[in-house]
């Protein structure tokens, strides 16, 4: 009999249509217990997308391990019982002349390659483990991984650039830790540091219009376009900034926050609640349509957002209690019933992964 928890590293997922299979098309999966079809229906997958400025070879799927181990050893077993499994994909990186990496197709990615790889990894998890069908999932990302997290979220709603031929359900929640949401603003605020323009250009090119199209906080379609920003079943958005962040400025979170307030609902329906180092916006309405935005400030530096995982684990735990399926055995539970979300098909043009085709 297999022992649990089971750590499955470097599982290969198929490259997106038109892309060459590379050494970075892998995903890690951690199963905390033996599968239980009935009990697993009320459990959520946690999926983490690593950062690293789209090019750092030292930031990998293994960056989720500190948080996973904290969940596994938590004294509060109710939280772990709400989690089906953990996963974290690797994806192709943009070229970095300063990093000693093999000179292969895995390190010459250009947007939307990173996004397409993440979507392909999600489809692999959906097909292999039924992620997103009977079991919902929460996406968590750190730094540029937070950018990818919200790019994935936007691919299910208002038209957004991607060219991946996948068929997957939308996430229940999006959590961004120290994320970059407006690329042009990042270049402007860090204009005295050439490195920022260098890694943005390496991942997205030199065209500012292309930066805006790829930025989750930009390219909002029409008046009130925020309402349809994500898929119907995405009910929670979380933005986190560290008070000692020396890499990404707080105005990135502020920009995305403005957009997400419009996503939560019309101003006249919003309630605003201040808690310790958190602000929460909610919209009134039927249970299935309630949306929540949580804006948080953590203590520490940029990389401590995920490398010192205590606050990250607490944040994810709160998210589980907001969007997780209601467990009748938990007295006083206010968790939202699970919402089975329609699949989203992404159309690919004849130009393949370089075309930047919009989701349809």
Image: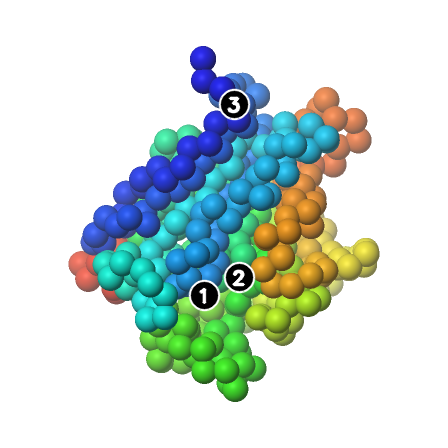
Q: Which residue is mark 1?
A: 53
In the rendered image, is residue 140 in sight?
Answer: yes
What crowding class fits label 2: few (fewer than 14 Cα within 10 Å), some (14-19), or many (20 or more)? Answer: many
What quarter of the picture does the N terminus occupy?
top left
**Which of marks 2 and 3 precedes in the sequence?**
3
Q: Residue 321: percent from the left, percent from the top?
A: 69, 39
What crowding class fits label 3: few (fewer than 14 Cα within 10 Å), some (14-19), or many (20 or more)? Answer: few
**Which of marks 1 and 3 precedes in the sequence?**
3
Q: CA distance from mark 3 to mark 2?
A: 31 Å
Above-or-below relation of 77 to 349: above
Observer-nearest of 25 and 97: 97
Q: Residue at x 31, y 40 (%)?
A: 12
What quarter of the picture does the C terminus occupy?
bottom left
The image quadrant that residue 273 belongs to is bottom right
Q: Residue at x 48, y 27 (%)?
A: 6
Q: Residue at x 42, y 68 (%)?
A: 214
In the rendered view, does 151 fall on the left or right side of 348? right
| Secondary element at image label 3 | loop
Q: Residue at x 45, y 47 (%)?
A: 61
Q: CA distance from mark 3 to mark 1?
A: 34 Å
Above-or-below relation of 89 to 277: above
Mark in front: 3 vs 2: 3
What crowding class fits label 1: few (fewer than 14 Cα within 10 Å), some (14-19), or many (20 or more)? Answer: many
Q: Residue 251: percent from the left, percent from the top?
A: 63, 74
Q: Which residue is mark 2?
A: 143
Q: Residue 202: percent from the left, percent from the top?
A: 35, 72
Q: Residue 274: percent from the left, percent from the top?
A: 81, 59
| Secondary element at image label 2 | loop
Q: CA distance from mark 2 to mark 1?
A: 7 Å
Q: Tell me, for residue 4, which label it has, or none.
A: 3
In the rendered view, does 352 fall on the left or right side of 148? left
**Disc 2 and disc 1 in contact, CB within 8 angstroms:** yes
């Amino acid at each position: 009999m297999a022992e649990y928890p089971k750590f499955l590293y470097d599982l290969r997922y198929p490259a997106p249509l038109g892309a060459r299979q590379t050494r970075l098309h892998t995903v890690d999966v951690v199963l905390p217990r033996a599968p239980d079809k009935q009990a697993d229906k009320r459990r959520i997958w946690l999926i983490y997308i690593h950062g690293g400025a789209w090019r750092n070879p030292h930031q990998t799927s293994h960056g989720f391990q500190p948080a996973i181990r904290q969940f596994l050893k938590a004294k509060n077993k109710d939280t772990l019982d709400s989690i089906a499994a953990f996963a974290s994909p690797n994806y192709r990186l943009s070229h970095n002349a300063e990093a000693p990496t093999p000179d292969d197709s895995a390190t010459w990615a250009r947007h939307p390659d990173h996004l397409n790889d993440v979507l392909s990894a999600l489809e692999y998890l959906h097909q292999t483990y039924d992620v997103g069908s009977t079991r919902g999932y929460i996406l968590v990302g750190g730094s540029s991984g937070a950018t990818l997290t919200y790019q994935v979220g936007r691919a299910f709603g208002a038209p957004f650039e991607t060219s991946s031929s996948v068929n997957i359900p939308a996430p229940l929640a999006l959590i961004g830790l120290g994320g970059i949401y407006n690329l042009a603003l990042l270049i402007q605020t860090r204009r005295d540091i050439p490195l920022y323009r260098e890694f943005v250009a390496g991942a997205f090119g030199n065209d500012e219009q292309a930066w805006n199209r790829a930025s989750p906080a930009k390219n909002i379609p029409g008046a009130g376009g925020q309402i349809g920003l994500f898929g119907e079943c995405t009910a929670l958005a979380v933005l986190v900034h560290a008070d000692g962040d020396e890499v990404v400025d707080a105005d990135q979170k502020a920009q995305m926050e403005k957009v997400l307030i419009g996503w939560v609902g019309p101003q006249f329906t919003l309630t605003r609640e201040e808690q310790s180092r958190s602000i929460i916006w909610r919209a009134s309405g039927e249970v299935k349509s309630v949306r929540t935005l949580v804006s948080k400030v953590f203590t520490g530096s940029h990389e401590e957002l995920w490398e010192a995982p205590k606050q990250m684990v607490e944040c994810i735990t709160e998210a589980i209690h907001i969007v997780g399926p209601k467990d009748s055995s938990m007295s006083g539970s206010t968790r939202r019933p699970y919402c089975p979300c329609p699949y989203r098909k992404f159309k690919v043009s004849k130009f393949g992964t370089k075309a930047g085709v919009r989701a349809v």
